[in-house]
Amino acid sequence: MERSPAARLLLRLTTAAILLFIYLPIVLIVVYAFNTNRVPTWPPAGFTLEWFGRAAQSSEIRASLSLSIQAAIGATLVALVLGTLAAFAVHRFSFFGRETVSFLVILPIALPGIVTGIALATAFKTIGVQFGLLTIVVAHATFCVVTVYNNAIARLRRTSRSLEEASMDLGADTWQTLRHVTFPSLRTALLAGGLLAFALSFDEIIVTLLVAGPQQTLPIWIFNNYLRPNQAPVVNVVALLAIALSVIPVYLASRISSEAAGVPR
Amino acid sequence: MAVEPVTSLSGRMPDQAPESLRRPVSAQAAETAVRLEAVRKVFGETEAVAGIDLEIADGEFFSMLGPSGSGKTTTLRMIAGFERPTSGRILLHGRDVTGVPPFDRDVNTVFQDYALFPHMNVSENVGYGLMVRRVDRAERDRRVTEALRMVRLAGFGRRKPSQLSGGQRQRVALARALVNRPRVLLLDEPLGALDLKLREEMQIELKVIQQQVGITFIYVTHDQEEALTMSDRLAVFSEGRIEQVGSPADVYERPTTPFVAGFVGTSNLLRGDVARAVIGSEGTFTVRPEKIRMTDPDTAAGDDELFAMGEIRDVIYLGSDTRYVVALDAGGELVVTQQNLETSSMEVLEARGRAVRLAWKRRHVLALEGGPSAGEEEARRNP
């Protein structure tokens, strides 16, 4: 569509304004992470890597980072297994209440985190599970399953059933068909779904606060420390780390998805 | 409607089929490749296949022709092993395979949507059957190369299916099936997605390849012209049953039921009062449109000819031929095709409304088994 120069300029300005509105605060955090001044002031007083060193030396930060990564990996693995199985079940078999099951699998992502958190915390207390890594993994898995499930079922629906028939027709038994045809056609969908699940788990705080017990994940550590004045620059450094660990998986996932869909980059 | 004898294609045969793809000529040429005994298939409340018996000879090009929902694809899928018959038996070369899974049957299928594995390149696709059967690498490569050469895709091995045109994908699917040297090849409307010109080319190519490799082809199609030009024999399906089995000439020239007369060619049925008035006897009869001579009303008919008077109601100009719909004075209508030997499009179109005499040889009248015609079936289903 041809647009007039004025319209084009307006469109560019609007886009720029929206992007600034979203990303300027984030840029600010990033800049302050390198600021020599302990209190956030503009313009930055000077450039330093001191806060990075402090963050690296803090055993508290290292522990919370490690917990966050373990929880995210655990939740992702659980989500991959359950999400794939659920997608297969809903796609392959017709059973009573299939649509309902499909809806119920997706629902947790829409449920308010605070509700999920309270519900799970209550449930864990009722059955007497000690709060810690395990409860975090289980809690995160409830909504991480959704990304895997959605990616897997979309791929299954797009993949023709005749591919598996062709494989069997050519002499492959059920197992060979799964290995050579079904799984490879799901692979990129699972990878993308898993990366999104990882990112989702990594920065989750509401549910985590309620089921983590005395443990601190990275977001909880940030939450507990950002109001302490002398911690402010270190918090910015940790935030930078959190950004990287969530943005990179999402970026990779979207690349994988568009590649699989054959969209030229 | 051209019923071209298939032997005329041999002049266009490219190279001989590679040795590895040809099956040894069997000692008894007329051995039965596929045998269906009272095969039925019910899906829920629907009877897709209502009990059919069929024998297909080794090396035959056999078509299953019928409208969608007539049970032809379900029958093919039962032969392939994707569906299990509700009752009845399926024998492949004498072996009962009714409950045998697809991967243990000596048949291969060319799917309507080709079903090429998108994550594999052309060579990997073609070599898939050999790979899962653990044929060693060197042998596999050799046979894949030969198969690709046969379908004129030598050098395409490294491409992905998404980089191929529809016709090329179709040929990859064919190579992927043939490379396994199946005893029977099943083809499920394989040309349905191609445009007309490509489809005609592929019809010829398929027929040539079938003659080269000498294996049984079972070909599902709803295109009567395709079935007539390619097949040695064909079965006409309707509502889960086989209406007629025979050679193309048989089925076209001597349809036994109104459905076959209507589905293969134009129905041109004469029945009831009209039959009594025109033919002079009770029953349902058909005359093929090209067997009818259309003349001025006062031209005398030949001695062995039947005739009917009528008025041209509609003219469809088809280039080489013209199709006239003639309303008979006795009631009903007949379709007549005439070659445009000396007439131009202007002249034929002016013929609308003209009174004519239709005449045809007595031997071109075929008596059909009773029952409603295809048209009436249609009308009953969609009132």
Image (cartoon, grey):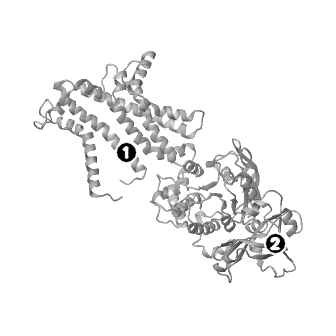
Q: Secondary structure at mark 2?
A: helix
Instruction: Name above or below for residue A16 compared with residue A204.
Output: below
**Which of these two is toward me, A239 or B55?**
A239
Q: Residue at x 28, y 29 (%)?
A: A65
Q: CA distance from mark 1 to mark 2?
A: 68 Å
Residue B275 is drawn in which quadrant? bottom right
Q: Residue at x 70, y 74 (%)?
A: B352
Q: Residue furthest right?
A: B281
Residue B350: % across, % down:
68, 77
Label number found at residue A35: none
Q: Secondary structure at mark 1?
A: helix
Does residue A87 appear left or right of residue A30 in this picture? Answer: right
Residue B167: % across, % down:
53, 63
**Any part of residue B273 in sight:** yes
The number of numbered discs placed on residues in the rendered structure image is 2
- Which-is-in-front pick, marks 1 and 2? 2
Query: Label 2, on which residue?
Result: B364
Residue B123: % across, % down:
49, 58
Instruction: Name above or below for residue A101 compared with residue B114.
Output: above
Q: Residue furthest bottom?
A: B342
Amino acid type, label 1: Ser
Residue A211 is drawn in which quadrant? top left
Amino acid type, label 2: His
